[in-house]
Image: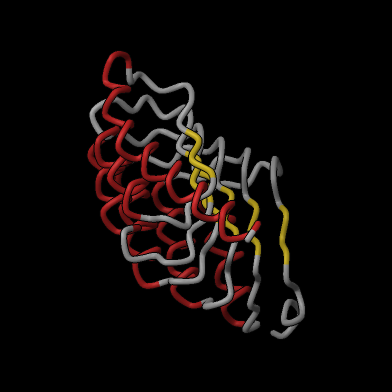
Amino acid sequence: DRKFINLKRLDLESCGIGDAEIIVLVDALINSRSMLDALLLGGNYIGDTGASHIAKYINHNNYLRVLVLRINSIGDEGLIYLSDAFTSHSRIEEINLSSNQFGDSSTMELCSKLQNNVHLLSLNLSGNGLCESLSQVSNLFEHRQRIRSLEISNNDFGFNLSVLLPGIRSLTSVLVRSIFQNTH
């Protein structure tokens, strides 16, 4: 039961893992009391059920800092489970959810829940067909001054891109203050 206790980083990207395998993996990680700081599961077949079990692990592990779920099949329901877990998990710094199947409504929920995460440094939402949620992404960007990387390429923002300007201005002022403080 304690096989994974010293494991800090688990990279199972592009391993053909689906929801059934995630259920087994999460149970094994929880039962072994593993406290990963990085869980990389990109390029698999994880859907909403798998995302709900990953959320269970996030709630169980206070040390997780990096979560990569890019190129999976996570939809709106799965993103809601993850969003709830991110609310209670304050140490997560990097989240990569690019190229999944969720939309604007669950992305708005995610951004709302991430407002309270003081450690978030990097968020990747590229390639999810987002459009209307850009204003919510901008609000997150504007109020979370620690965010250093926001990737939103390959979405359908069109002319709505001007909504990002307040967030970009906020980030620019934070970067200028940071640079000024580090040089003086």
Q: How many marks?
A: 0
The front one of 107 and 80 is 107
The front one of 134 and 67 is 134
The front one of 22 and 83 is 83
Q: Tell whether 15 sits left or right of 108.
A: right
| Occupied quadrant, residue 183 | bottom right
The front one of 170 and 131 is 170
| Occupied quadrant, residue 22 | bottom right
Residue 133 is situated, as x and y percent measured from the top left of the image, at 26, 34
Residue at 52% x, 78% y: name it. Answer: 62
Task: Say if 164 sits above or below 11 in the image.
Answer: above
Q: Tell whether 90 sits left or right of 111.
A: right
Q: Tell whether 84 sits left or right of 25.
A: left
Q: Quadrant of the C terminus?
A: bottom right
Residue 108 is situated, as x and y percent measured from the top left of the image, at 25, 44
Residue at 56% x, 35% y: name it. Answer: 71
Residue at 73% x, 64% y: name it. Answer: 9
Residue at 65% x, 82% y: name it. Answer: 32
Task: Say if 66 sits above or below 2 in the image.
Answer: above
Residue 2 is situated, as x and y percent measured from the top left of the image, at 72, 85
Task: Say if 184 sits above or below 28 in the image.
Answer: above
Residue 119 is situated, as x and y percent measured from the top left of the image, at 48, 65
